[in-house]
Amino acid sequence: MNPIIPTVFAADPAARVWADDSRIWLYTSHDVPGTNTHDTMVSYHVFSSDDLVHWTDYGVALHLDNVHWAISHMWAVDCIYWRDQYYLVYCAMEIGTRWFRTGLAVSDLPQGPFRDIGFIKNIHNGQDPAVLIDHGIPYLYWGYGKQMFACELETDLLSAKEETIVDLTDQLTWAYEGPWLHTYKGKYYLSYPGLYEGKWPEQMYYAIADKPLGPYTYQGCYIPEFKGCAGTNHGSITEFKGRWYAFHHSSWVSSNGVCRSLMCDELFYNEDGTIRTIIPSPAGPSVSGGAPGPSKVTLLLQAENGKDACGKLLGTRISRDVPEYTGRGYVTGFDVAYSGVEVFAQQGVAARYRLKIRYRAPDGDRNNYLLVNATRYDDPAYDGPERYDKLMRFPQTDAWQELDAGVIQLDCGDNRIRLYACDGGIDVDYFKLEPCE
Ligand code: FUB
C-alpha cells in the first residue's frame, strides 16, 4: 500500500537492485518530524524488501555528525556498487562556503552504515546527485534551481572529469532539480522533478537520449500533480522481478510537505518506449501484480554499528570470533556494571513494536537491564510499561538466539534502546523491532 513506508518520514528515494540479491533497496533522505523546513535534514536511511510489502528499515545509514566537512542540508541521495564496495552518493552543505557538495561514503554492505570519504572535486553546487554506471564508466548527474548537469567521474569516484561536464538544462523542459538515470531497451532515460510554467508543486518529467551525456529529448510528464503531493517530488525508476516501478514521495501521512513519506507505483511503457502517466494510488505496488496488502516495516538495528548509526558502545567492543553473527560482527565485553550497547530508532509516528534481541549467553543465565528512551535504569520519570527499564533474564545459550523482550512503544522522533550490564556475560548481535498488528 502507499505510502510504502508509513512509519518514518523519508524522501527522495533512490531504488537499487543489486546483482545476486532478491531484494530491492531504497536509499533515502530523512525528514525530521515536527519541522517546517527541509534545512533540518541531517541523515540518510536504507530500506530493503523482497516483495514491496514487507520492508526492513536499517536505521541511520549516515549522519551529519559523522561528516566532518558538512554543516547541514543532507538532501537527495543515490547509491552505487563500484569495485566491490557500496558508495552512498549524497549532498550536503559545506562548512564555510555553504555550497552544496556531492559527498561520498563507503560501505562493504548495502545497508551501511556508510563511512564518509569526502566530496567529489570539480563539481560546483552538487545538489541532488544520481549515478549511472554504463559500460564500466561512472557518470554523475546533479541538479538544482532549474539547472541540470552531468559528467564522467574518475575511477576513484572522487573527481569529476572537468572536460566532460555538460549542461543539460536547455534539453529538459521545466527541469528544477533531482535527476535520475535508468536505461530501457538501449535508451537512456533522465527523469526529474520540474515546475510546469515555473509553478509549484513539482511534477515528474523525463527525457530520452542515445548516450549517457545526451543530447536528451524531452518526452513529457509521467507523475503529474496529485492530491496529497508534498510540494516537492523526487523519484527513481527501476525494474524489479520483471516489473517496472516509479518511486517518489508524498505528504500522505503527515499532510506536511516537509515530513514526507515514500511512495511506489507500477510503471508501464508504451510500445514506442514512452512512459504512461502514473496517478499515485493508495493500493500501491505488488510484485505479482495482485492486491498488495498493507506495508509492514521491521527495524533491524545492528548492535555493532555504534555511533556510525547514532548508537553507542559503552565500555563494550566489537568481535567477530563467534561465527554466524549478522552484519559486521557483534558486541561483546559486558564486563562491568553499566557497560552496554545502545541503538537508535527513528519514527515519524509513534508505534508499538515487539522487540527481539539476538544474543548468546554461553556461561549461564544472565540478568541485564533493558532501557527504552530513558537515560538511567532507575530514572523516576519512567511511566508505565512502554517507557521503561526492565531487568531481563537472558537464558543460557551457546548458539545465537532471539530473546523476545516484549512490546515497546517507539515515540515520534528519536528513540534510544539501551542494554546495560547487570550480570553482563552476553554477546549481542542485533535489536529487531517487529510491527504489532
Ligand atoms: O529532500 C530535500 C530536497 O527536496 C531534495 O534534495 C529535492 O530534490 C527535494 O525533494
Image: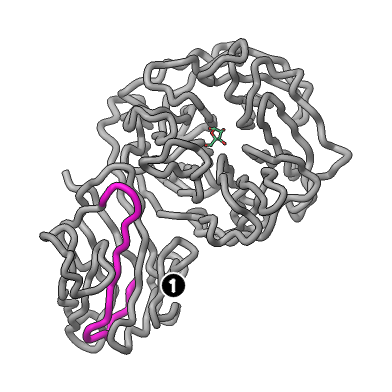
Seen at 50% across and 45% down, the residue is 41
Q: Dividing the picture into quarters, in which one does residue 6 lie?
A: top left
Q: Which element is circle 1 on?
A: loop
Left or right? Give the position of 163 relative to 4: right
- Give x and y (percent) for residue 206: 62, 20
Work out which quarter of the rendered image holds the C terminus and state it: top left
Q: How many residues crowd mark 1 within 10 Å: few (<14), some (14–19), many (20+)?
A: many
Prevailing SS of the magenta stretch: strand
Residue 420 magenta-highlighted: yes
**Which residue is label 1 attached to?**
329
Which amino acid does the dot numbered 1 rest on? Gly
Q: Residue furthest left?
A: 384
Left or right? Give the position of 75 relative to 309: right
- Give x and y (percent) for residue 396: 19, 82
Work out which quarter of the rendered image holds the N terminus and state it: top left
- Give x and y (percent) for residue 88: 59, 50
Q: Dividing the picture into quarters, in which one does residue 286 lie?
A: top left
Residues shaded magenta: 411-428
Q: Residue furthest right?
A: 163
Residue 110 magenta-highlighted: no
- Give x and y (percent) for residue 14: 53, 38
Q: Is residue 229 visible?
A: yes
Left or right? Give the position of 38 relative to 50: right
Ligand number 1: quarter of image: top right
Seen at 40% across and 20% down, the residue is 280
Q: Is residue 398 visible?
A: no
Q: Is mark 1 within 8 Å of ligand 1?
A: no
> Vertically, is 336 above or below 435?
below
